[in-house]
Image: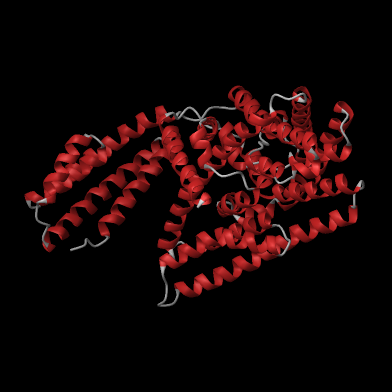
């Protein structure tokens, strides 16, 4: 019951966050979600509705699906082509960052090496979701974006393994190198093999289902949603990387969807809609939880005698990561100065970093060390988001603002509907059919006010349905109108390349409306 109430509260908060983000388009949705999380944490009644943070539930129910969907948006060919770079980013650069940050903390602050390495290992995972918060409305270099995305897909597993190594070092007093290397290979390779094998079996089953009379879209979509949850749980049970398993499965699902666009169009379309819906909700939840946890942690641990110490540690970890990332980008990836700066600042830390920190027991580390780890990692997350948000505004070119794009799209939409209306007026149609088609097209223009719409809705309740012949003529009218609209959008899309993304979105809306018209009406 507690989990259900928590999920319901977070879902409502996520919906509110998404709505507010649409209204305030100059502020990233992730920041708005974080602010809402902070508000929930500060209001005792709302804070009480959400259960204590459970890292295992968070990783399986939220992070695993998000990484699966992120993997599905990535072409497996691109990953294969960059495999050397990915290994470098997620193994070599991560180790360098750990060594530099660990020894820097030890030498400058004077804490033990094992504890310093625990803090350094937690800081290694980067978050693709969090990166979107700092690049909102900005144009990132394409090469850097690809590197950051590939890094964030796979480096969570590296962080988990290095954290386990550091914890064993803290407990035993020495590093077991052979065990760490063995664990890394088993976890990463095992996760990849398991993810590939399970995804391959699911794909064979789905393709066989498509070609049989037992095909069911609902069953397919249910399997699709449950895949990352079941796969992550199975991987963790077998002691291999659940994160790598779901990412590899997502990559393979992407390859399948590319080859099945025409044979399985409905399922792919519905799957993408589900993916976008779940991703938006879960992304918002991640930052709501992040804001909430910041409040809960700081409420108990902020004003203590180690305030200066954890602030110092947080800053050292952040600067060490920046230095390693910039140097690696310049010397190994051979980026120029601007690209290296963007890459170094683009390694944003988010909820996965906080989740790793909270997996550690206060009893294991001791209260003082535990507080130091939690608060320094919380500061790292804040710095990694705040600093690039400010600096990127000065070093990255700005995209077309949503406000400017909306003005252009409204003009395009109005002209598009105007041409469609002219085509309908030229058609021979019964008056009742023509009135309905024209009114529906005007709705597409969004000029019909809510009060007027509700009045028309009440009138239609008592009106008889269209006859079969009238329904047929209505469909023909809509098909003609939509054909005119698409023709206009194709023409304008070639001229206005600056707004092509927005025009394609409008084109997609027209196609969706046409698909709804094709569906037979209920009697």
Q: Residue at x 66, y 33 (%)?
A: 381
Q: Residue furthest right?
A: 174
Q: Please state which of residues 158 and 429 is positioned toward the viewer in this rendering.
A: 158
- Examine the image and state in which quarter residue 500 appears: top left
Q: Residue at x 62, y 57 (%)?
A: 246
Q: Residue furthest bottom?
A: 213
- For the C terminus, which image quadrant? bottom left
Q: Residue at x 50, y 28 (%)?
A: 27
Q: Residue at x 65, y 40 (%)?
A: 143
168 on left or right of 427 = right
Q: Please state which of residues 28 and 53 is positioned toward the viewer in this rendering.
A: 53
Picture mark count: 0
The image's colour scheme reads secondary structure
Q: Please state which of residues 281 and 292 is positioned toward the viewer in this rendering.
A: 292
Q: Name the spot of residue 271 as percent of width and height, x first.
A: 46, 57
Q: Residue furthest left?
A: 431
Q: Please state which of residues 19 and 210 is positioned toward the viewer in this rendering.
A: 19
511 on left or right of 27 = left
- Examine the image and state in which quarter residue 306 appears: top right
Instruction: Say above or below: 215 vs 74.
Output: below
Visible residue check, residue 263: no
Q: Name the spot of residue 467 as percent of width and height, x first.
A: 10, 61
Q: Name the spot of residue 142 as percent of width and height, x first.
A: 61, 39
Instruction: Say above or below: 470 vs 283.
Output: below
Q: Name the spot of residue 29 as percent of width and height, x first.
A: 50, 34
Visible residue check, residue 118: yes
- Examine the image and state in which quarter residue 472 appears: bottom left
């Amino acid at each position: 019951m507690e989990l259900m109430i928590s999920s319901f509260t977070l879902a409502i908060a996520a919906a509110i966050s998404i709505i507010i983000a649409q209204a305030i388009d100059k502020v990233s949705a992730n920041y708005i979600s974080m602010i809402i999380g902070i508000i929930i944490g500060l209001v005792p009644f709302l804070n009480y509705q959400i259960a204590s943070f459970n890292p295992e539930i968070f990783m399986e129910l939220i992070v695993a699906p998000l990484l699966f969907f992120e993997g599905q948006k990535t072409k497996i060919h691109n990953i294969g082509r960059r495999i050397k770079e990915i290994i470098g980013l997620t193994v070599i650069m991560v180790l360098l960052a750990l060594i530099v940050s660990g020894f820097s903390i030890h030498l400058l602050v004077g804490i033990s090496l094992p504890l310093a390495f625990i803090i350094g290992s937690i800081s290694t995972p980067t978050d693709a979701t969090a990166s979107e918060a700092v690049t909102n409305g900005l144009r990132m270099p394409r090469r850097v974006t690809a590197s950051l995305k590939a890094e964030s897909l796979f480096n969570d597993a590296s962080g988990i393994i290095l954290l386990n190594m550091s914890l064993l070092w803290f407990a035993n007093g020495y590093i077991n190198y052979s065990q760490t290397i063995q664990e890394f290979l088993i976890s990463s390779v095992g996760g990849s093999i398991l993810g590939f094998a399970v995804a391959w079996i699911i794909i064979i089953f789905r393709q066989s289902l498509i070609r049989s009379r037992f095909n069911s879209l609902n069953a397919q979509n249910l399997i699709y949603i449950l895949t990352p949850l079941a796969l992550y749980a199975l991987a963790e049970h077998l002691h291999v990387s659940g994160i790598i398993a779901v990412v590899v499965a997502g990559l393979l699902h992407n390859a399948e969807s590319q080859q099945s666009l025409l044979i399985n169009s409905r399922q792919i379309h519905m799957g993408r809609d589900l993916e976008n819906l779940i991703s938006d909700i879960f992304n918002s939840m991640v930052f709501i939880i992040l804001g909430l946890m910041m409040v809960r942690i700081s409420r108990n641990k902020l004003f203590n005698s180690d305030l200066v110490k954890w602030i110092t540690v947080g800053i050292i970890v952040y600067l060490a990561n920046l230095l390693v990332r910039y140097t690696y980008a310049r010397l190994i990836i051979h980026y120029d100065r601007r690209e290296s700066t963007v890459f170094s600042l683009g390694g944003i830390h988010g909820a996965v970093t906080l989740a790793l920190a909270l997996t550690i027991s206060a009893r294991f580390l001791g209260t003082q060390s535990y507080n130091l780890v939690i608060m320094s990692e919380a500061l790292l997350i804040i710095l990694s988001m705040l600093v690039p948000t400010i600096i990127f505004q000065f070093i990255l070119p700005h995209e077309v603002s949503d406000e400017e794009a909306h003005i252009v799209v409204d003009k395009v939409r109005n002209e598009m509907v105007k041409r469609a209306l002219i085509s309908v007026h030229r058609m021979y149609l019964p008056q009742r059919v023509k009135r309905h088609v024209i009114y529906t097209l005007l709705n597409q223009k969004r000029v019909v006010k809510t009060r007027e719409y509700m009045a028309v809705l009440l009138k239609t309740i008592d009106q008889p349905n269209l006859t079969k012949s009238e329904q047929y003529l209505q469909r023909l009218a809509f098909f003609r109108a939509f054909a005119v609209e698409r023709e206009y959008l194709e023409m304008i899309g070639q001229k206005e390349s600056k707004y092509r993304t927005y025009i394609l979105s409008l084109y997609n809306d027209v196609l969706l409306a046409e698909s709804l018209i094709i569906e037979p009406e209920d009697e």
